[in-house]
Image: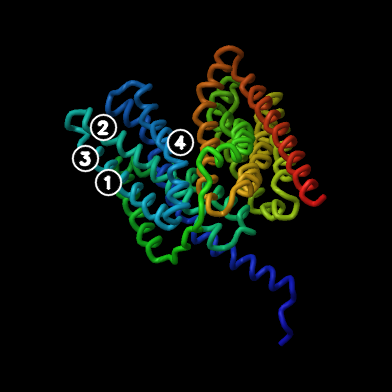
Amino acid sequence: MPPPSSSQTLASKFNADSWRIAGYTSFTFVVYLSIGLPLAVLPEYVHLRMGYGAALAGLVVSIQYIATFLSRPWAGRISDHVGAKIAVERGMAACTLSGVLLLGAAALHRTPAWLSLTLLLVSRLLLGVGESLGSTGATLWGITAVGQEHTAKVIAYNGVCTYGALALGAPLGVVMEQAWGLASVGWVTIAICAASVAFAAMKKPVPPVHGEHLPFRDVLGRVTPHGMGLALGGVGYSVLATFVTLYYASRHWDGAALCLTAFGVAFITARLLFIRTIGHYGGFAVAIVCLVVESAGVLLLWLSGSSTMAMIGAALTGWGYSLVFPALGVEAVKRVPPRSQGTALGVYTVFADVSFFLVGPGAGAVIGAFGYRSVFLFALICVGAALGLVVVLAGRARRQVSQQTA
């Protein structure tokens, strides 16, 4: 029997590495499935069934993102100092407890409403902390387990798990709540997260890198330019996800859901097909191409005269945005030593959290002043600014390499 060719050997190694990475990013999938399940359920539940105002219903959802934002750097430092496995175990335990409190809130909805609401708020806070610990720990665990050369692939697979889990969880949660009530969402959350705690406990730990860790302010200073590029580049996605339904309604078009589907399919397809380009061409080069494509997509959304044109714009936006996070993330992680990479990942991801959190009110103000169409011009300006920033960062990196080799 002839020996396997070099291409077959590489393909086999690629598949083996992909399965190993999936074993770590699966924790991210569980975290975001737990987030997705109640995402479309809670606003209606709090507003229509519990009788609270729309603002408070929105707070029940958004408070999770505040907790995530505040705990991201802390989760990174735990991953660096104690170990990524510990961070994942604590994160999945927090998500499990969040499900327990959600179950309690559902059971106590006929008692004084404030008690049920308090349990919901604490549940959301715990879910935000669990998101920080679970996703940051899973990413660093994967990178340290499979090797630094697979950093881009780990970050990319993590993103596929994130968006895939949210896309699955939101409609599934609605179906479950309508069929069996809010308690069913709590039970499923407890089951999948508790199982993940057990799965994490059985996996081999990767010890943290010992040595002096960079002070947090130094990590923040090194990662901030890349994080700003991520935050600005993410405005296209945030605007599309938040306002496309209202935009379609304002134009009297049908098919807003298909527009979001086009974005999601293009996003995941591009990540899976082109993730290896980051290793071949470098993070900055890939990010520049991606931001150009994303700009074209947002431009089409701004100029669209039909739902078909808007759908093509959404697909281009998803295709372009797909590799921005891993491409800039690889470059951000390079700026710090291995023993501080968990903190760097946590800080870097904070910028995405800030972008998603601030775009809603910011873009809403733009819509209030200039109409729904203008929100995509606002997004185009932000993505263009991200492109300019990344070009500057790429030039700086080239000069640094030239100085080191001179």
Q: Amino acid at mark 3?
A: Ala
Q: Position of residue 31 (x, y in %)?
A: 43, 48
- Residue 11 position by quadrant: bottom right
Residue in the image at 41% along x and 42% along y: 35
204 over 139 or under it: above or below: below
Q: Residues within 10 Å of mark 2 (few under 14, many from 20)?
A: some
Of all residues shown, which one is farthest toward the bottom?
1
| Whole-number angstrom distance, CA of label 3 to CA of label 4 | 29 Å
Q: CA distance from mark 1 to mark 2?
A: 13 Å
What is the spatial separation of the Cα atoms under label 2 and label 3, in whole angstroms? 13 Å
Asked where in the image residue 205 lies, by quadrant, the reply is bottom left
The mark lying in front, picked from 2 and 3, is 2
Q: Does residue 100 appear to the left or right of 236 in the view shown?
A: left
Under mark 2, the amino acid is: Thr
Specify whether residue 259 is in view. no
Assess whether mark 3 and mark 2 are in contact (beta carbons under 8 angstroms): no
Residue beneath disc 4: 69
Q: What amino acid is labelled 1 in the image? A: Val
**Residue 379 at least partly seen:** yes
Which residue, given by chain and number where applicable, does mark 2 sit on?
118
Q: Which residue is mark 3?
A: 107
Q: Residue furthest left?
A: 111
110 left or right, relative to 25: left
The answer to whether 45 is drawn above or below residue 154 in the figure is above
**Residue to which mark 1 is pinned:** 100
Q: Which amino acid type corresponds to the residue marked 4 in the rendered image?
A: Phe
Q: CA distance from mark 2 to mark 4?
A: 21 Å
Q: CA distance from mark 1 to mark 3?
A: 11 Å
Q: Secondary structure at mark 1?
A: helix
Residue at 31%, 33% in the rendered image: 121
Nearest to the eye among marks 3 and 4: give it.
4
Residue 395 numbered tag: none
